[in-house]
Amino acid sequence: MCKTVLLHCIENTEPSIWQKNSLLTCLTNCLLKLHSCVQNDHLSHFIIQENNLMAGQFTAGLKHELSEKIIDFVQSYGQRIFRIDIDDLGHRLQVKLNKVPQRAYNFNSCRLLSASYYLNLALQSSSSHRSFLNELHNKDIRTLEQSVKTLMEFSKNGNKLEQDSFQFLAPFILTTYGTALASSSIGENNQVSSETMDLLSDGSDSDVSSSRLKLASVLYCTGDMEKAERILGQTEQQFYSHPVTPVCGCPPRPPQELPTEFMRICTEQSEDCIKHITAFCVRFTQLEINCAPHEIQYEMFRSTQDDMIHRDQHDLWMNWAVVDSLPFLYFLQYKIYGHLQRHLDRQKALNRLFISIEVDKNLKHRETALNILGQIMEQENRPQDALEYYIRSLQQRARNNAANFHICKLLSGLMVSQ
């Protein structure tokens, strides 16, 4: 299993990482991947992808023990390995590392090690939230309510590792629950109770943006444009205050470059800092559909019957609307400024949306952002531009893409108008 993890890590990281002076960093990356596999009970054979090497291999107790040992090792920044007595491994490794220029090793390896650990912690939180939402597939809001209560009790009675892990996941769960309640209320009478708004506020510190954007989206869908605009302004200011790294746990996850400032902050601060330097993607399940603008709702129905054949158990997220934080922020601003008759601000928001799609290399759901931009072009009576963005979206993801529907709808409308 460890050899298979190593092969997957080599395949999904830049070759430049695998250097002698990055030995501990490489090992830590492998351990973080192993930890994720243990948590999910899934490790694909490197050649035969459908073969899960971890299927039925670990009891719950052993799984917990392995997870604790891996995290303990990672948090020691590799110092645990120097105490391995078997084959005198710890001493031999120290001798080997002493041959590497210490200044370069200590600075680069430690900084990359910390940043890799924090990024993987954030990714694990996002993946855990995705797993939680997967469990709700085809379930109702009562099931969601019971799941939230169960998790809250579990967080109180679990061990320290489980409690520490849950503190990162809790805001996402509270936001999902609050948004689902809000969606039900909006569907009934277009109003949201103060208790539900309190839930959404309690979950707003999940990261820099995603939960706040869902709160703003709820306000937009209930017509409270001024309050939504204030939340968006505060959220945008967070992006300008310091570098923010996009995070997404929706597979597949390509390797991600770590900005220098992100690495510096991770080296100097505690784990809680990831809430202030990461922007998770925004997820709306079908239980939350009335809290998503109609332009986003199309993403919940992206798959044709033919597309469904090519999906597997890891693709349940395709039943949701998922969009990167920054494009969604500018899209909401565009819509809200339109309602407030602030036309100059509306145009600025559109320009920023365009720039974020064209410039940001770390967007995880670029096809969704392009679909949103295409719909805006339709609303701006620019059908040719809309078609161009839909086609670009299909170039990003040919299957399971709402752009197929948008193109058919656009062309049908053009034919009728002629």
Image (cartoon, rainbow, N blue to C red):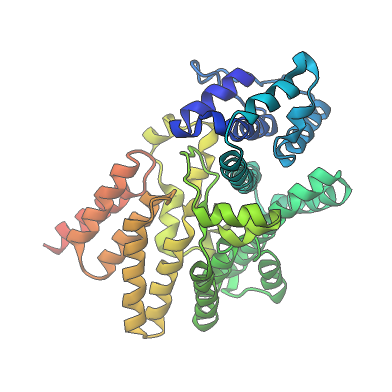
| Residue 327 placement, left or right of 385 | right
In this view, the residue farthest toward the bottom is 341
In this view, the residue farthest toward the left is 418
* The C terminus lies in quadrant: bottom left
Residue at 67% across, 72% down: 197
Q: Position of residue 170 (x, y in %)?
A: 72, 55
Residue in front for this viewpoint, 167 or 131: 167
Residue in front for this viewpoint, 213 or 233: 233
Residue at 32% across, 39% down: 398
Is residue 199 positioned above or below 61 on the image?
below
Is residue 194 positioned above or below 313 on the image?
below
Residue in front for this viewpoint, 401 or 18: 18
Is residue 265 positioned above or below 93 on the image?
below
Q: Position of residue 407 (x, y in %)?
A: 25, 51
Residue in front for this viewpoint, 368 or 31: 31
Q: Position of residue 33 (x, y in %)?
A: 61, 32
The answer to whether any part of residue 215 appears in the image is yes
Residue at 64% across, 52% down: 267
| Residue 190 placement, left or right of 193 | left
The answer to whether any part of residue 14 appears in the image is no
Q: Position of residue 364 (x, y in %)?
A: 44, 48
Residue at 73% across, 33% down: 70
| Residue 301 placement, left or right of 201 | left
